Amino acid sequence: MTQGASLVSIRDLTVALPPGADRALAVEKVSLEIGGNEIVCIVGESGSGKSIAAHAVMGLLPRGVQVTGGEILFDGADLLKLQPEAMRRRRGRDIAMIFQDPMAALNPVVAIGAQIVEQIHAHRAMPQTAALALAAGLLGQMGLRDARGLLKAYPHQLSGGQRQRAMIAMALSLSPRLLIADEPTTALDVTTQAQILQLIKTIQAERGMSVLFITHDFGVVADMADRVAVMRHGRVLESGTAAKVLGEPAHAYTRALIAAVPKGDNILPPLPEAPPLMAVTGLTKRFRRGGFFARPATTVVDAVSLTLKRGETLGIVGESGSGKSTLARCVIRLLDPEEGEILFDGADLARLGPKGLRPVRRRIQMVFQDPFSSLNPRHTVADIVTAGPRAHGEDARLARARAIDMLRLVGLNPEAMDRLPHQFSGGQRQRIGLARALMLKPDVLIADEPVSALDATVQAQVLKLLDDVRRQMNLAMLFITHDMRVAAEVCHRVMVMRHGQVVETGPTRDIFTAPGSDYTRSLLAAIPGRARLEPADPAQNIRQTME
């Protein structure tokens, strides 16, 4: 089938949510064509219905969610009219899916090789040795070293990128004609994300497959799509070729999504020279695993030094395993460093015991990556936000009154005080976490990947909020991220880390326009959509901003 002839025709698809949901329909009269040998991206924020539409194609809708109208034609046959057994034969063989979270999709107690072989045997009669050889060959094609060794590995023994590659190998094991990729790179580092995206494009071109790619990131769309459909609240607002939608978006919502992608064209200038509020020197952290016969300790943070001025945001950038989050936890003394000093307002935090740390802790607060797991699910917002002040002796009524003002500051309605965390969106929960941290009037705020799991528009809102709060309260901020685009939005200076060591440090504009290391250049090159979404001359834009 040549590109252009439809392999899949989704016509007026309507999917209903169970009673009690926030709306009646997850998908409402959605129509979409997927041609042979092309990549179609569905883009939209959380709750737009894009994943539900994809799961409807697979016949994998959650319990209580059901198709109430429309048809899904695959090579002329309506998938919605197939009997369960016929649909099972289609699934995996003709239509395969890469799920968003491979750790949740893979069986944690079954080796990777056995899981791939299980899918092969479900659709094809093949000797075990031949199936294992096929599985090893697929893992090798995914760019994984020691493919035969990985057949015996369990999901928890692989990195995020390795797990995603194993999931792709499983999906391709039966040479499907349609591959559905549901947010397959959302939680990955930018360099790993770039590798996975290129891998999917290469395999699609080699095999002539059709790909339905689900994402909330227009940067990814710019790198991947032949055609694009933009969804919101269960409906398709706009569709067309990638060049048309990216270059001449017709709908205001599409323009807002594109505008929300960080582009590195409004970089903050470095602050004037001033004495540091915090100075970290030679900080080293090692982890020891095992018992009496344990292996030598692993150095996770290796003699790192940094300074932080009042009112300044220092971005700490690096991939997973670079040591950036461990460094932050050492600075706040959630972990004890083996070596080095942490001078904060004249005191060395690395040498303070629990009693000495207690009065200092309220001056250094942290916003965590996952607000849902860091908020007590059984406590109301009022309890969560006022817990810190009450623990330090503040009157509960006074703390509640201040909490109302703090919620307004972070853009939440004070009526949220008596609700529980699960009743809020991801962006709202992150605002609650920020309000909790700010209630103690800290001098230093540590933000650990605070926007990595958020949609592009919500991410832009939270980044602006963090920068506004930093200015209003004259905070010093350590901003941890793996995304150079995000660092450019809020950081005066950037420190790049790799394998526990500092690669380079400097003003954000210098790191972006003249990076001093190959590693930093690789992080910049891996930014999705950089060529198609950024200004033609970002360096010129930065110069204009500075002037």
Image (tube, grey):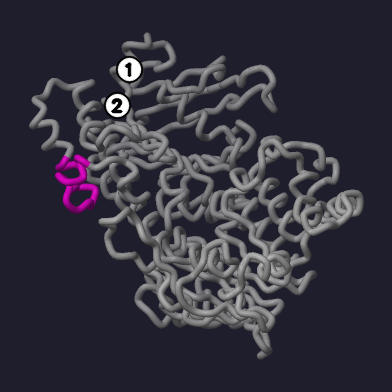
Q: Dot 1 surroundings within 10 Å: few (below 14), some, or many (20 or more)?
A: some
Task: Write the residue at 40% across / 67% down.
Answer: 286
* Image coordinates for residue 5, horizontal then vertical, percent: 34, 32
Q: Label 2 belongs to which residue?
A: 92
Amino acid type, label 1: Arg
Measure the alpha-carbon separation of dots 2 and 1.
8 Å
Start-end of magenta stretch: 136-152
Secondary structure, mark 2, is: loop
Q: Label 1 belongs to which residue?
A: 88
Asked whether 383 or 65 is in front, the reply is 383
197 shown above or below 465: above
Task: Write the residue at 73% across / 37% down.
Answer: 420
71 shown above or below 543: above
* Image coordinates for residue 538, horizontal then vertical, percent: 53, 74
The quadrant where residue 47 appears: top right
* Image coordinates for residue 164, horizontal then vertical, percent: 34, 45
